[in-house]
Image (spheres, rainbow, N blue to C red):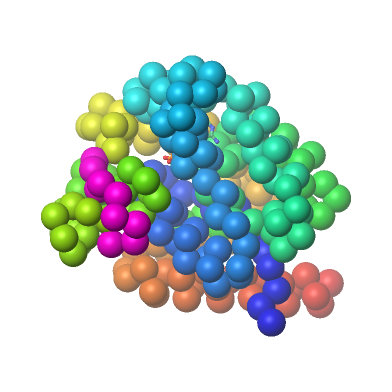
């Protein structure tokens, strides 16, 4: 039986995190915990958190740490994630969130943090052509649309461009990534948890690289 995993995936917007995280959650049979998807769910249901988050998200700004981490704490305290683990996508995005996450996952800790690396020009191209299902979040692109008339192949939902995939919001998110999220790379490297993976190439090739890195990291921990 494949053991679970306690995994964080970092990477710029458009690096393929969403696609890889879904694949990894199936491979390791653990929930895919995406803070972006959770926040989009809150917006759609018009909860108090969703109402506060919407304008920040549309502009590409970050949601305040305490609001996001309360949501993450609740999700990672559930039985499924405490038992087999999780693939955490989109969090942490700041050092403060990383510190808070340490407390949330204590005493088990994280197995590994993957940094999915893709050149910025490619990321801009991918984001401009990205389309998503409003219901299940499945990813498509103008080059690889759903089979029938922008209707999701997985659930039949409508496939659209994300509100925050405009040129200004994309640039703002990339700037925030450099300023707020990139420092987490050295922070996790110092903790001996970070592995950088080349995120270019086919989704299958990238998944194989990530699974290989996780297996190697596990062997390393076993030998220590
Ligand atoms: P994503 O789907 O991960 O690109 O997230 C979409 C948007 O949700 C981001 O641009 C932020 O506005 C917000 N968001 C998602 N995760 C976080 C987080 N960990 N901290 C702050 N804001 C977040």
Give above or below for 57 relative to 101: above
Image position, residue 206 (x, y; %): 42, 69
Which residue is drawn at the image coordinates 32% and 69% (left, top)? 201
When asked about the image quadrant of residue 100, the answer is top right
Q: Where is residue 124 in the image (x, y as percent from the top left)?
A: 26, 44
Residue 202, percent from left and from top = 32, 70
User: Looking at the picture, does residue 155 appear above or below residue 204?
Assistant: above
Q: Is residue 216 visible?
A: no
Direction from residue 35 to residue 15 in the image, left or right:
left
State the residue at coordinates (37%, 46%): 135
Quarter containing the C terminus = bottom right
Compare residues 219 and 108 and report the one nearer the observer.
108
x and y percentages locating residue 211 in the rendered image: 55, 73
Q: Quadrant of residue 25?
A: bottom right
Task: Confirm whether residue 158 shows in the render.
Answer: yes
Q: Is residue 156 magenta?
A: yes
The verdict on residue 135 being magenta is no
Using the image, determine if residue 58 lies above or below residue 136: above
The residue at the point 78 percent across, 70 percent down is: 221
User: Which residue of the protein is positioned furthest toward the bottom in this rendering?
Assistant: 1
The prevailing secondary structure element of the residues shown in magenta is loop
Q: Residue at x 53, y 68 (%)?
A: 26
- What is the magenta range? 153-161
Q: Is residue 196 left or right of residue 66?
A: left
Judge from the rendering whether residue 153 lies leftward or rightward of residue 189; answer left or right. left
């Amino acid at each position: 039986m494949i053991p679970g995993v306690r995994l964080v995936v970092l990477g710029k917007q458009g690096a393929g995190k969403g696609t890889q995280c879904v694949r990894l959650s199936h491979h390791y049979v653990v929930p895919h915990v995406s803070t972006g998807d959770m926040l989009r769910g809150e917006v759609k249901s018009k909860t108090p958190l969703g109402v506060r988050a919407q304008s920040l998200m549309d502009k590409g700004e970050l949601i305040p740490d305490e609001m996001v981490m309360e949501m993450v704490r609740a999700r990672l305290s559930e039985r499924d994630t405490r038992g087999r683990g999780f693939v955490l996508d989109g969090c942490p995005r700041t050092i403060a969130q990383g510190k808070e996450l340490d407390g949330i996952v204590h005493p088990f800790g994280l197995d590994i943090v993957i940094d999915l690396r893709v050149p910025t020009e490619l990321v801009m191209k991918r984001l401009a052509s990205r389309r998503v299902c409003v219901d299940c979040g499945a990813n498509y692109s103008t080059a690889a649309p759903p089979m029938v008339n922008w209707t999701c192949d997985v659930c039949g939902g409508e496939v659209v461009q994300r509100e925050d995939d405009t040129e200004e919001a994309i640039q703002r998110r990339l700037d925030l990534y450099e300023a707020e999220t990139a420092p987490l790379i050295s922070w996790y490297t110092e903790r001996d948890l970070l592995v950088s993976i080349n995120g270019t190439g086919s989704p299958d090739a990238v998944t194989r690289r990530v699974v290989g890195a996780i297996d190697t990291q596990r062997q390393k921990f076993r030998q220590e």
